[in-house]
Amino acid sequence: MKVCFYFQVHQPMRLAQFSVFSKKGETVFGRYFDEGLNKQILDKVAAKCYLPTNRMLLQCLEKNPQLHLSFSITGVFLEQARLYNPEVMESFRSLAKTGRVEFLSETYYHSLSSLFDEKKEFEQQLKLHETAISEFTKPSKVLRNTEAMFSNNIAKMAEGMGYEGIMAEGIESMLGWRSPTYLYSVHGTQKIKALLRHYKLSDDIGYRFSQKSWNQWPLTAPKYAKWLSEIEGDCVNLFMDYETFGEHHWEDTGIREFLSGTFDEISKYSSLEFATPSQIAKDTEAKGEIDSPEVVSWADNERDTSAWLGNEMQRSCFSEITALEKQVKEINDSELTRVWRHLQNSDHLYYCCTKSLSDQDVHNYFSPYESPFDSYINYMNILQDLKSEINERMRK
């Protein structure tokens, strides 16, 4: 059984508080984005998670020559790391230099561009991401689309761009009676393989690790490795936000010691071996076909696109941002294009979610706004101002 750990690393460019009465900034970017807040948050999470966890992983890789790991790291994050905290960027470079850490392909701007009517933007953002990753390591031939959004059509587009594998959520609505611990071909494609996230075992770490009411608390490294050893299949894909290690679960929970201990415990089982998504896609045969005509994701109980497009506010914002594509690309101004793409970031729509119970609690945890309605008003004010900026430039 191949064990694949892969971690999502992302921080959005958060928006400035904006209204129709806001003063015009020197640049369009400075008008819409709160760079002070973005640096503050990146530095905080770097101190709690990125830097200490990267140091720990580097030590684990040096100690255990069998260990392989993977990251899905957005271009937006890389941009902020270079701007605000170069030490963070260097710590990821150090991991890449080991040759045993894979950096998966992503949309550069963590966007919903795979859902645009015109798919060229999706392809362009994947190429931008490949260029960014190429600055410090070899780009991967495995795609992890934004928020693990996946469908037959998305897989077909990825295959057309030369990707050999694509990550997806291993949900029952797509699998039926089958297990996420096998690789699958995708309906309507020729060669690409789907690697499915084992959401229960992933969420045992990502969500439940420090939950004392959980019937398996405390989760220990020997216990977790034993669970893995008892699974039937070819591979188990364990995916979680990287902020799990020090930010979502604080250092005093022992989360980092648990992770390093788990690597040690896995190494004790001859039936288990570490692998990256590319290694799995290359060496493992598909054991059947999955069919996903509708888009699935890893978010919320529905595991669909409703976390970003579930209400009228979100759909209205998405319609506004996509409608600007033709004019933005016709103007062909690098700063304006960059601003438009940063505004595509899925987090801005995520903050506008109005669900109930635990799903909404998660949305509120990540949101810098008092309410989804405050988020919508601010985001829509910016979109309307950007539209005015574009119209003004088109008239010149």
Image: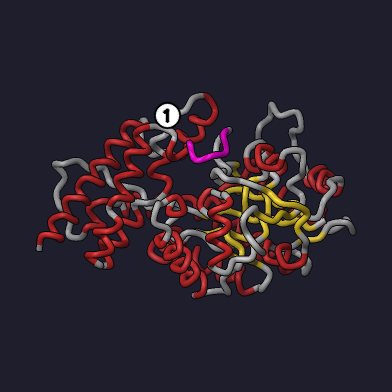
Residue 126: give x, y in percent of width and height: 48, 64
Task: Kindly state the secondary structure of the residue where label 1 is placed.
Answer: loop
Left/right of residue 128 with respect to residue 194 in the rendered view: left
Which quarter of the picture shows residue 165?
bottom right
Look at the picture and state if 331 lies above or below 31: below
| Residue 11 seen in render | yes
Query: Horizontally, is 31 left or right of 1 in the view?
Result: left
Q: Residues within 10 Å of mark 1 (few under 14, many from 20)?
A: many
Amino acid type at mark 1: Thr
- Which residue corresponds to the image point at 57% horizontal and 45% vertical from the top-left? 293
Determine the main secondary structure of the stretch shown in magenta.
Answer: loop
Please tell me how many numbered marks the rendered image carries. Answer: 1
Q: Quadrant of the C terminus?
A: bottom left
- Above or below, 159 against 224 in this view is below
Q: Report the front residue among 88 and 279.
A: 279
**What residue appears at the point 71 percent right and 54 percent down from the top-left corner?**
184
Which residue is denoted by mark 1 in the rendering? 354
Q: Quadrant of the N terminus?
A: bottom right
Q: Residue furthest top?
A: 357
Residue interval drawn in magenta: 302-306
Residue 271 falls within the magenta-colored stretch: no
Q: How is the image coloured?
A: secondary structure
The answer to whether 122 appears left or right of 284 in the picture is: left
Identify the residue shown where x is 59% and y is 68%. 140
Q: Position of residue 146 (x, y in %)?
A: 51, 52
Rendered position, 30 above or below 15: below
Furthest toward the left, the residue is 396
Task: Name the residue at the front extreme.
Answer: 188
Return the residue nearer the eye: 90 or 274.
Answer: 274
285 or 221, nearer to the observer: 285
Residue 305: within the magenta?
yes
**Residue 352, how many percent across, how many down?**
38, 36
